[in-house]
Image: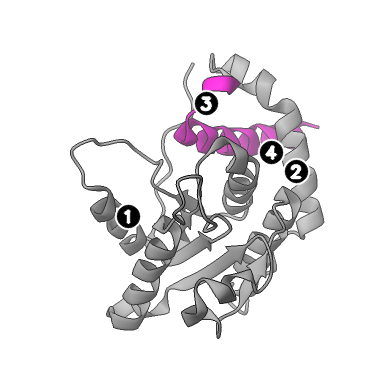
Amino acid sequence: MTLRPRVRFPAARSVFINCPFDTDFQPIFRAMVFTIVVSGYQPRCALDSTDGAEVRVNKIARLIGQCDWGIHDLSRVEVAPGGLPRFNMPMELGLHLGARLLGEGRHRRKRALILDAERHRYDAALSDISGQDIESHGNDPDEAIRCVRDWLSDHRPRDAPPLPGARAIRGDYRLFNAELADQLARRRLDLETLTHSDFVYAIRDWIEFRADREFIG
């Protein structure tokens, strides 16, 4: 038994995620991914696929070009053990802003959610964006859910109903995590070695399974 086929989304429903992918940041990253999927959008990031022949910056630019939405987390721009800050996240934010400022057509409608661990901390390191709205998640997955949910809901069409509230999505996420191991076992997948793509598919699979279960009930 395999997971359901990949769901393809247009740029208007695709959200590029620019953030750290290390183990320490994973709880926040996965909380953001879950919120995007249950809100009806498709998360995109550098983990979507691996191609050793593709230049990384080209891949990032292509993904940004395919998404009308972008989440950029700057909470890891502090100085690393080697004595230098990490510039990848600010650079990818620059690509997104450049596409919006200099691009044509739908690229001028690109929306960005800029996140940091502390409000206004970025002023010292990236003052060029000090005039923009920056949200803070405080390194808390629950707050990351709120930030992403509110941003997506605020920019929905005026005649569209709002998304479920952050508290409801947090409750869904806790239930999803509680049931994930059993769900993966049915799919013959291992939680410890789950790839990003499989995690996204597992969210969609859980949503459909829950919908079927509630309908039967």
Q: Which residue is mark 1?
A: 60
Q: Quadrant of the C terminus?
A: top right
- Mark 4 vs mark 3: in front: 3
- The residue tagged with tag 1: helix, strand or loop? helix
209 in relation to 172, above or below: above
Q: Is residue 196 magenta?
A: yes
31 in relation to 206, above or below: below
Which amino acid, by three-letter code, is at mark 4? Ala
Q: Which residue is mark 4?
A: 211
Q: Which mark is residue 172?
A: 2
Main secondary structure along the magenta-highlighted residues: helix
**Mark 3 surroundings within 10 Å by alpha-carbon count, few (fewer than 14), some (14 through 19), many (20 or more):** few
Q: Which residue is mark 3?
A: 194
- Mark 2 vs mark 4: in front: 2
Whether residue 153 is visible? yes
Which of the marked residues, 4 or 1, is nearer the chain's N terminus?
A: 1
Which amino acid, by three-letter code, is at mark 3? Leu
